[in-house]
Amino acid sequence: MKNNSYMVKNYMLLAEKFADENDIDRALEFYNKAYQLKDGRRNVELLLDMAVFYDELGKEQAAVEKYNEVIEINPKDARAYYGMAIIKDNNKEYEAAIELYKKAIELDPSYDRAYFFLANVYDEKGNKELAIESYKKVIELNPEDFWACVNLGVIYEEQNRNELALEITQKAIELEPHHYKSFFNMGVILKKLGRIEEAKEYYERSIEEEPYYQYSYLNLGVIFIENKEYKTAIEIFSRGIENNPEAASLYYNRACCYTQLGKREVALRDVIKALELYPPLLEFMKTDQELDLIRNLEAYKKLFN
């Protein structure tokens, strides 16, 4: 019996080694060798490892079977319910996911990951107050959870609870001083609070940390458009396009700036490029007053008629 347990453990280690090397067939071979042993079929850690592995391979039914085997052995193992919740969540079966996350939390009230993904589901379903409650619980259990702070800040901003959004987003920045997303979110909040110069600084910090995130350029450029500083806005959109050549919104907004400066032909080229990248823009552009100054161009007429 002792030797049997040792073999299970050894096979598990080999399976994990091959999984790390992305040798899927060999990993499965050793997981199954461990499982075929008498002790393997009752080894909860093996069953959980296999369930996670199957889930990562997209073999959801096999993963669920292993989670259910865990529950048969130990009905109070919160990890099995959490694992099945993740599968339901990924398939957008949100009601089932919620019940499974809640079951995991009932069995293990300190299960911060279950609270975190429960909050995500509530947010996805539009249950913002329940999402807030769950994110707060995550932060209570793990005060250094960066993404819980980020996501909670986003919800507060969506609800125009901007001072709360500012506070929790600042906490996120303290936790991860170089993450572009929290800088971007801070820019959004500060802009809403009328703290424009600070908002600009945070958008620039976001760009510095992640030059391939188009929305930092977009939001920063729009600030300058609103102030009729079209040349500066063009510079910002051009920087964004250099790093994000597939970003239709940047071409479109740059076209609007060129239009305001009377550079109609250049504006039209950006309009055409934006439509190549994102054809659904066509209906919006037909009525957008920002483009009025180029509507009489023959190329524009051919494009829209």
Image: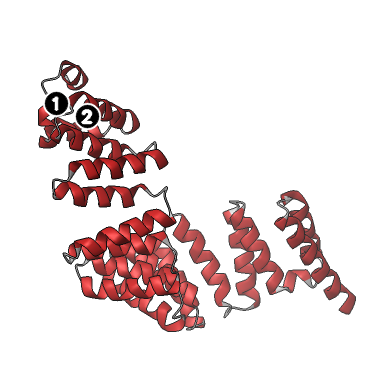
Q: Is residue 239 left or right of residue 113?
A: left
Q: Residue 19, position in %: x, y?
A: 71, 56
Q: Residue at x 67, y 66 (%)?
A: 49
**Of marks 1 and 2, which one's residue comes earlier in the chain?**
2
Pick the residue in front: 273 or 37: 273
Q: Residue 238, position in %: x, y?
A: 32, 39
Q: Is residue 188 left or right of residue 242?
A: left
Q: Which residue is mark 2?
A: 267
Q: Residue 178, position in %: x, y?
A: 44, 64
Look at the image and tell me whether residue 1 can be seen.
no
Q: Quadrant of residue 46?
A: bottom right
**Identity of the amino acid at label 2?**
Ala
Cα distance in 3D space between marks 1 and 2: 8 Å
Q: Secondary structure beneath disc 1? A: helix
Q: Quadrant of the C terminus?
A: top left
Q: Is residue 124 left or right of residue 82?
A: left
Q: Residue 86, position in %: x, y?
A: 50, 63
Would you place residue 108 above or below residue 200 in this image? below
Q: Residue at x 31, y 34 (%)?
A: 278
Q: Is residue 112 left or right of residue 200?
A: right
Badge count: 2
Looking at the image, do the residues carrying marks 1 and 2 touch, with CB atoms under 8 Å apart? Answer: yes
Residue 97 tag number: none
Q: Residue at x 39, y 72 (%)?
A: 172
Pick the residue in front: 2 or 248: 248
Number of residues whose C-alpha sits closer than 10 Å to that of mark 1, classed few (under 14), some (14–19) or many (20 or more): many
Q: Quadrant of residue 149?
A: bottom left
Q: Which residue is mark 1?
A: 294
